[in-house]
Amino acid sequence: MRIAVFSTYDISPAENGGETRLVNIYSRLSRTEDIRVLSYDIRMSGGLRKTALTPSLQNIVAGISDRDRRRYQDSADSVELYTHDVMCIQTYAFTAEFLNEVDDAMSWADVVVLTHPYMADLVLPKRRRNQLVIYEAHNVDRRVKAAYFKDARDRVLGSSFVAETGRCEARLVREADLILVVSEDDLNGFINDYDADPVKLHVIPNGVTVGAFDAILKDARLAFREAAGLVDVDVGVFLGSAYGPNIEAYRLARQWLSDGGFSGDMLIIGRIAEAYNGSWPKVGFREHWLGFVTDVAKRLYVSSADFAVQIMTSGGGTNLKLFDYMASGVPIISNSFGARGVRENDWFIKVESAADMRDVLAQREWSRESAKKAADTAYHIVSRDFDWDQIVAKYRTLLG
């Protein structure tokens, strides 16, 4: 089976949640299928790059044209927000190289996957008869954009982006043969917002490679903490890209930790480090801004912590980092929103306010037997329901 996947960003190297999801799903599917991932990426200027991520997974990246970059910059300056994805709806002209690759992929593919609604107007008119179309929705995108653009400097332009996102998403919901969502909440969101046919909807959740965490030895964790000077101190960890909700989440969490008297160390992993600057309030604990690291290093650092922080206040879908925390066996301090996508109870330390965090810190809840039991429950849940191999097996079944 030949599968063409369309994205507004390069998926490699996988640095954020969307990229990580796509790489994990389609690299596994490529063991039995031929796959092309096509993206129009703002981080690359012109040209075309083709890379084999696996023998049967080709990553095709077209750099944005100078003309489209100027259009992007004008819109981004107007709303003071990132607009590349929504500009793909109808504003960009794209490059000839990218359009040629789109035409070639649409002629070649048996299955067409759109990972967001933003290229629906470009791709759907090229659909061939009997070609399976899948909307692989990482969020209910109109909801995400409504929250994102509510504070746009140019409110009119921001509102138009939300409306266009909704129009494209509605079209894709109507015309797709399958709609894959990351959670039951998103499934219900598509039914409520677009009257989506429930028969089309299937939950293909975010996940983690559980076995990769299992392979980390206790001696390796102890050696890391000793080398990093983290012996006999409490160590927390936070994973995050430079995505707005992650920045907002950690700023709140660090305030709660500091106000609650935390005096240990925090490991902050991911591109969120690029958002940190001297204007942030000082805190009463040590922060180690580690930036983007390899998957191997990330798993070691997370597994070596005493607790993970999953305080989230906004964003769509589910957070992939949550499943990293669950697979690591480390107790998780989370609010209800941060734990969305996992229906069961009693697998995390619940914190909904600064006062709750103060109590957790005062009691060092993560060191208690109840927290270790909760972490074991989280590991059991993620092993059963959120391992990438199991998730992709379900996806493969849907493909027939």
Image (cartoon, grey):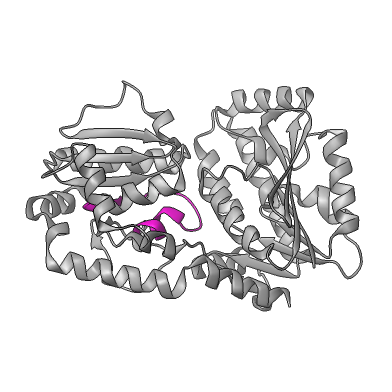
Residue at 27 percent across and 70 percent down: it is 376
Q: How many marks?
A: 0
Residue numbers of the magenta segment: 305-325
Question: Residue 284, relative to residue 178: is it above or below?
Answer: above
Q: Is residue 152 magenta?
A: no
Q: Is residue 51 left or right of residue 187?
A: right
Q: Is residue 32 left or right of residue 107?
A: left
Q: Is residue 313 magenta?
A: yes
Q: Position of residue 66 (x, y in %)?
A: 76, 22
Toward the viewer: 343 or 396? 396
For the question of whether residue 311 can be seen, the reply is no
For the question of whether residue 87 can be seen, the reply is yes
Question: Residue 214, relative to residue 96: is it above or below?
Answer: below
Residue at 86 percent across and 41 percent down: it is 99
Toward the viewer: 18 or 220? 220
Q: Position of residue 155 (x, y in %)?
A: 58, 33
Q: Position of residue 347 (x, y in %)?
A: 28, 68
Residue at 39 percent across and 38 percent down: it is 247
Q: Is residue 236 left or right of residue 75?
A: left
